[in-house]
Image: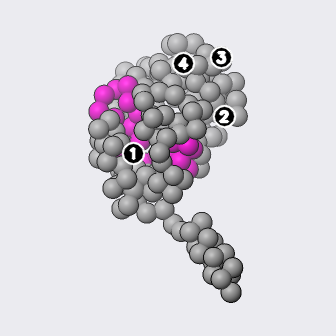
Amino acid sequence: MAFFNICGLISWQVLAAPDAVLGKTKSQTCFACHGTDGIGITPNIPNIAAQPPLSLFYQLVQFREGMRKGGGMEVLAKPLSDDDIRDIAAYFSALSPPEAKAGDAAKLAVGQKITQQNYCNSCHAPKLQGQKQVPRLAGQSIEYFVTQLRNIRSGARVDMDGTMGSAARGLSDEDIEALAAYSASLN
């Protein structure tokens, strides 16, 4: 009988839904850089508001496991359990997305064209709002976007399955800047 009670408890814990309220409490350290609203306090810090929860989960696990480096995130993520990460992801994913940023119309048109030619929306969704494990690009900081895409292109940032590395290889710096401006213009 005790065995079945333990199995039931384990199953319940595995199936327990993430808790955004608890996630806010667990996110106190995150607020120093990402703010309570999930908007980076400087342009080199990503906006994580309204990111798909699975995308946030995978990014934090990658930092925790040392597969991704940057900004001291690996140290901050190290002590987090999977449940902590799920709760934190639930909190930030429930926040309002970043506001769209105006930009040069010609550059935005080029960015939109590159997005269409490279089928960015097939993974990042029609308005680049992200889906499942694929991050939201809409409303992202231009500086952060440019840095990360250049790092993916060069291999400095590891891409889990190689899809982004392959997609980025053919992009020029000007293409990346246009994509960043276009993404920032979306909400």
Please provide percent x and percent y for residue 68: 56, 31
> Are there few (<14), some (14-19), or many (20+) residues within 10 Å of tag 1?
many
Q: Please report contact status of discs 3 and 1: CB closer than 8 Å, yes or no.
A: no
Name the residue nearer the viewer: 134 or 79.
Answer: 79
In space, the residues marked 1 and 2 are separated at their CA atoms by: 22 Å
**Disc 3 and disc 2: Cα gap in Å?**
19 Å
Give the x, y percent position of residue 19: 43, 63
Q: Secondary structure at mark 3?
A: loop
User: What's the residue at 54%, 18% (across, down)?
Assistant: 150
The image quadrant of residue 91 is bottom left
The earlier-in-sequence mark between 1 and 4 is 1
The residue that label 4 is drawn on is 150
- Is residue 135 rendered to the left or right of residue 91? right
Look at discs 3 and 1 and give the one toward the viewer: 1
Q: Which residue is label 3 attached to?
A: 170
x and y, in percent, of residue 115 in the image: 57, 29
**In front: label 2 or label 4:** 2
Q: Are marks 3 and 4 in contact (CB under 8 Å)?
A: no
Q: Give me the disc on residue 37.
A: none
> What kind of residue is marked 3?
Gly
Rendered residue at 34%/55% (across/down): 24
Residue 128 appearing in the image: no
In this rendering, is residue 5 above or below 151? Answer: below
Q: Secondary structure at mark 2?
A: loop
Q: Which residue is mark 1?
A: 49
Asked if 97 appears above or below 169 in the picture, the reply is below
* Residue at numbered disc 2: 160
Image point 51% across, 52% down: which residue?
A: 81
